Image: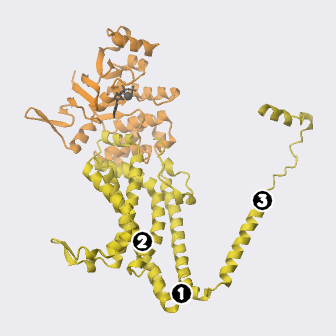
Chain colours: A orange, B yellow
Amino acid sequence: MTLAVKAVGIRKSFGSHEVLKGLDLEVAYGEVLCILGPSGSGKSTFLRCINHLETPNGGYVWVDGAIMGYELSRGALEGLPVKRLRAQQSQLGMVFQHFNLFAHRTVLGNVIEGPMVVRGLSRAEAEARAMGLLEQVGMAAKASSYPSQLSGGQKQRVAIARALAMEPRVMLFDEPTSALDPELVGEVLEVMRNLARGGTTMIVVTHEIGFAREVADRVVVMIDGEIREMGVPTHVLSNPGDPRVRSFLSRVLA
Amino acid sequence: MHHSHSSSTSALSLADLPGPDVAIRPLHHPWRWISGGLVILLLAVIGRAFAVGQIQWTVVGEFLTAGVIITGFGWTLLISACALVLGVLLGFAFGIMRLSENPILRFAAWLYVWVFRGTPVLLQLLIWFNIALVFPRLYIPGLIDARMVDVVTPFVAAVLGLGVNEGSYLTEVVRGGISSVDKGQKEAAHTLGMTPGQTMRRIILPQTLRLILPVLGNSAIGMLKFSSLAATIAMGEMLNAAQRIYFINGAVIELLFVCAVWYLAGTTVLSIGQYYLERHFGRDGAAATRERRWFKGWARRPVAPGEA
Ligand SMILES: Nc1ncnc2c1ncn2[C@@H]1O[C@H](COP(=O)(O)OP(=O)(O)OP(=O)(O)O)[C@@H](O)[C@H]1O
Ligand SMILES: [Mg+2]
């Protein structure tokens, strides 16, 4: 088992509000980890700290041999210049709840943006590979549409292709289906299921307990900025030890 | 209410309903004709008043294409174009600074807007024109060393005055445009590994530009007209040229009308250009510009982009 991500003692406060109270997490290559928990428990914040969209107030994240945003020098962590941080961030593909597609770019334009601008691929090469990814998420036919012309499920599949185009080591998903109409959830989960089957390392914040049970290798339950439960889905979901986890699960499983 | 209404119409029984070929007579709108007629009458009265008034229309026609006037109009166009370019550059520079994370940059941009939006543009023109009274020499080591009066000619003063003033308005417009591009797209760009500069250039500014294009159209039209203020600082643009002519020949109204014709021609061309420019940019799919009409451009402000 090779580690892909290791988060150590992550703390985050907004003002005087301590949202994350020192979280530790390890994710191995090829693993699918689902993060569950009630609204406001800090799941999104944790995910955003992992890829440094939010800078943690304490602790650090190690990804594939380097510490996000810092360099270890003489026993202390020295902040990295933005350019190097961005290079690290591109190793973590992020899929947002609200898609965040570039509104002025076509579907294809969205997917080739990162490879062309950040990795310096030629347009022809970036497009060829983007078409392959769009094929994979079932969106090749819409390559020249604009985001405003797509349904939510289609947007999210494009967003997944866009993140995959950077060939990230790990994919992060923040409630990728929560903004979708119920009948569109399935198509996005199907794409994610295929990714998991293909061996993609994934950290997924979700309210889809069914998906977690079926696809996750491990699940984590967060409550009030702490990890209360961690383990294989069958175990955590059926007989959690922590009483607050039990009451959370009984509510969402009801 | 509704119920009683429907029951009163149901007095028409099904058996009495006409066939599908029944003649249909749409409602007439007599008031449209009457009000339209009144307006035409009014316009005719005004037109006649000017036709028989103390205006020598032949003089208007004569000076419309006079060399001095055409040259003056050329200067008007040049001043407007240069000032608009300067204003746009300043607007983007300070608009981006306004949203900087650096509080000193933010403050500098705020100060710029405060000063130049808070004073009349005519006053600013006069100050630029007389700047040599404050700084007799312009001296930048290794670059330039000259008398200020030689540097700040009436043309330079006009471009600076109008451009810097316009920039203060556009700063606010650019700021609004940038902050209306939703923050999620910026975050998405960051997670792809794009630097702040790349994100600004490739993701934020193109969408900002589309949002502020209608405002830029208005700026261009406004600038063409405001350039006439430069007549007061001895800049030989069109109005100034017209004034110099009528001081000699006394045909005041005639020459002012000549100017009016040229300004109208200029603003009309700009309005048409604005229409096509917006239509062109609107085609790129951003929901914000989809149902634009040229006449809406006159009063338009940036609108929130469609959710993406
Ligand atoms: N940028 C911010 N500024 C201030 N407070 C924030 C910010 N982001 C999150 N919070 C607060 O941190 C807490 C955790 O938020 P977070 O979005 O991480 O929860 P979550 O578990 O993802 O919830 P949900 O299931 O509703 O998405 C909340 O109380 C929220 O109000
Ligand atoms: Mg969340």
Q: Is residue A109 above or below residue B144?
A: above
Q: Amino acid at mark 1?
A: Phe
Q: Is residue A182 above or below residue A221?
A: below
SS of the residue under disc 2: helix
First in residue order: circle 1 vs circle 2: 1
- Closer to the observer: label 3 or label 1? 3
Q: Is residue B163 above or below residue B60?
A: above
Chain ID at mark 1: B
Q: Amino acid at mark 2?
A: Ser
Question: Pointer 2: residues within 10 angstroms few (<14), some, or many (20+)?
Answer: many
Q: Which residue is at 47% across, 83% downward?
A: B70
Query: Share a chain, discs 3 and 1?
Result: yes
Q: What residue does disc 3 label?
A: B31
- Contact flag, marks 3 and 1 (Cβ < 8 Å): no
Query: Share a chain, discs 2 and 3?
Result: yes
Could you tell me if residue B52 is visible in this image? yes
Q: Which residue is at 49% across, 61% downward?
A: B277
SS of the residue under disc 1: helix
Residue A25, image x and y in percent?
Answer: 25, 22
Give the quadrant of the N terminus of chain A.
Answer: top left
Q: In the drawing, does residue B11 fall left or right of residue A2?
A: right
Task: From the viewer's side, name the closer residue of B69 and A93.
Answer: B69
Q: Amino acid at mark 3?
A: Trp
Task: From the viewer's side, name the closer residue of B77 and B198.
Answer: B77
Q: What residue does disc 1 label?
A: B63
